[in-house]
Image (cartoon, rainbow, N blue to C red):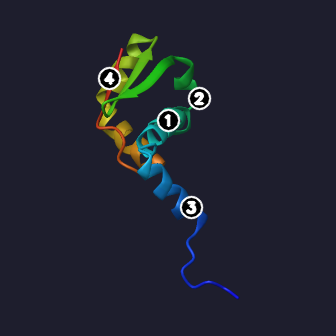
Amino acid sequence: MRRRNTESIRDVIEQFLKQKKLDKPLFEKKVVDAWPEVLGKNIMEYSNNLYVKNGILYVTITSSVLRHDLFISRENIVQSLNNHVGNHVIDDIVFR
């Protein structure tokens, strides 16, 4: 006999993460992991020390020329990262 009020495992996990307030750190980790996928492995070679704090992604870029180019297009990068994750996680990026 099949129950009529079943839920998918995905929905149950999402509800659990929201109740335990673990969904925000999970999405922040996904944004950091998405950096090389969205921007490419070449840019990842010049990037290190990525972390999210208070809705801002902090990235250390070792090339000043690349840092300037990324700074100019940071709004597009924010949008691409949020779209890749599927949730609005970051509002801005700070390049160091």
* Circle nearer the N terminus (2, 1): 1
- Quarter occupied by residue 25: top left
| Amino acid beneath label 1 | Lys
Crowding near pointer 3: few (<14 within 10 Å), some, many (20+)? few
| Amino acid beneath label 4 | Val
Q: Which percent across, then down, holds residue 40?
A: 55, 33
Is residue 46 shown left or right of residue 58? right
Q: Residue at label 4?
A: 94
| Residues under numbered marks 3 and 1 in contact, where contact means CB atoms less than 8 Å apart | no
| Residues under numbered marks 4 and 3 in contact, where contact means CB atoms less than 8 Å apart | no
Q: Report helix, strand or loop for mark 2.
A: helix
User: In the rendered picture of this protein, how many numbered marks are placed on residues?
Assistant: 4
Is residue 5 shown left or right of residue 92? right
Q: Report helix, strand or loop for mark 3.
A: helix
Q: Give how far apart the Cα atoms at labels 4 and 2 are.
A: 19 Å
Q: Residue at label 1?
A: 29
